[in-house]
Image: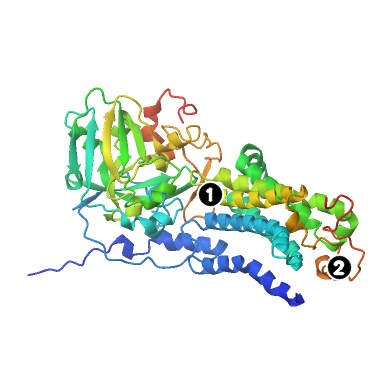
Amino acid sequence: MLIRQAPEIRYSEVTPKNAYLNRRRFLAAIATIGGGLTASARAATPFGAIVKSPLSTAETPTPYADVTSYNNYYEFGTSKEQPARYAKTLKTSPWTVSIEGAVAKPRKLDLDAVLKMAPMEERIYRHRCVEGWSIVVPWIGFSLNALIKQVEPTAKAKFVAFESLYDTQQMPMGRYAGIALPYVEGLRMDEAMHPLAMLCFGLYGEVLPNQNGAPIRLVVPWKYGFKSIKSIVKIRFADKMPPSTWNLSSAREYGFYSNVNPTVDHPRWSQATERRLGEFRKRPTLLFNGYGDQVASLYAGMDLRKNY
Amino acid sequence: MKRWIKAPVFVLCLSPIFLLGWRALHNGLGANPIEFITHFTGDWTLRFLVIVLAITPLRKILRWPDLIRFRRMAGLFAFFYGCLHFLTYIWLDKFFDLSETWKDVIKRPFITAGFLAFVSMAPLAITSTAGWIRRLGGARWQMLHRLVYLSAIAGVVHYYWLVKSDVRWPLAYASAVGVLLVYRILMSRGLLGKLNSVGINRPARTSPDLYGRSGRPPVPDPLAPGRGGQRR
């Protein structure tokens, strides 16, 4: 007998609970934010079974519509709305990630090969932007250390450097970014090996929308969002601290570490509080974005004021 | 120019508020509505500062002296949008925590600049009435109202310092304000003689509208020559 199973309802087809709850709260204060999330046809995901991760926060995720329409992705424009509009030109397939530097097995990996490196997990993480806003996102991916272990870094590898795609054909807005491109970022080896550091391929059960850094991005939830580099094409293992884009742009404002820290202000604004999208009042920012129990030991003995 | 023309211009100046309201009612403020409102009101403050600074040059270049009738309105609208911008900040960002606000103003240069731009508009708004022009006298009134230059410069600096890396818009406002200020410098040195001779600097009975409806003529024209008001 054929038993038909009802297809799973996708997140994007449902207005999340917090969407209407938060919105009502906001409504009372300012005006109305209504609007349904439009269910759009998306390609089937290449993820297979997705395991719910114990690393997830219990906080309610920010609505899909907000997560995918409010982005910093300067290659596609410097305003928050532009990436959603202009990132359509990004070609995410074929996609290769080049593994270079101090590794036993340097190679170019097809995206498909990367996707198969570990079982996919859904991890609901807090995400705090250096600009003072935050979101909660159900990311899809796995720990970065799964990839690192398979490419076998040598003893010389003390840091991992990442590089984003920069193709002026696909990213004509990049010329107005005001920052040096391609975008580069880096982590210390122990940070990169930390289970919370995540290679990410999707959100809300679906493939990453282009504006969120498709097809492969980093998510480092205890650091400011700009550390979580998007659309990665190169991963290089190095013995020296690699350059990072915002640090090159303004070293006194953006350090290499850039751990979320309410007591170390950005020179131009306070980091003590943040606005969670959808909320009216600002909320206090937590040290290491609330992941201190897991990651504080990485920085034992370090002066977090100096190593901002 | 007809008297009634002021009403539609007034409504036009208010139209950004209608637009904002419409967007608020139609889910058009994006994922971060408070940020949207902050930027929106700040943008319009700067735009009205540019407009108010453009009026004097335009009346000469377009040989349209009656434009002066809109200068006070434009200035007051700059202050109006500035008030909304400041209110958004002190309410939705600081939740009326005055000590936090003051700390911000002192500690953060971009907020210092914005605050300076806003505060320097206040005396101009207060003394924008016919009564105050009379009380201060044209020359002194005009001296005081040169504060608008400070306000515009500080406003542009505020915007420039706020932006992270893409400075195209701040630079656009800086250029506009720069051109309008250079025009005044050249004017005061008599380097733009041709434009200056359009003949609209006469003490004229330009329009009673500028000074309210009192009908009393002895109101000194702030643009009239004499007593150091206008150097030529």
Q: Quickly name the residue at label 2.
A: B205
- Does residue B217 appear anywhere in the picture? yes
Where on the picture, by quarter, is residue B12? bottom right
- Relative horizontal placement of residue A153, taking residue B186 as reference (left or right): left
- Three-letter amino acid code of the residue under disc 1: Lys
> Disc 2 marks which amino acid?
Arg
Chain of the residue on which disc 2 is drawn: B
Q: Specify whether disc 2 shares its chain with disc 1.
A: no
Q: What residue occupies the far front of the structure in this picture?
A: B194
Image coordinates for residue A230, horizontal then vertical, percent: 33, 45
Q: Residue at x 85, y 65 (%)?
A: B204
Residue B64 drawn above or below residue B155: below
Dot 2: what SS?
loop
* As drawn, B23 above or below A240: below
Element at label 1? loop
In the rendered structure, are the residues bearing label 2 and label 1 in contact, judged by CB atoms less than 8 Å apart? no
How would you rate the neighbour count of disc 2 (Cα within 10 Å): few for under 14, some for 14-19, many for 20 or more?
few
Chain that bears disc 1: A
Q: Position of residue A165 (x, y in %)?
A: 30, 44
Separation (CA) of disc 2 from disc 1: 55 Å
Badge 1, how many Cα within 10 Å: few under 14, some, many 20+?
some
Instruction: Point out which mark residue A282 bears.
Output: 1
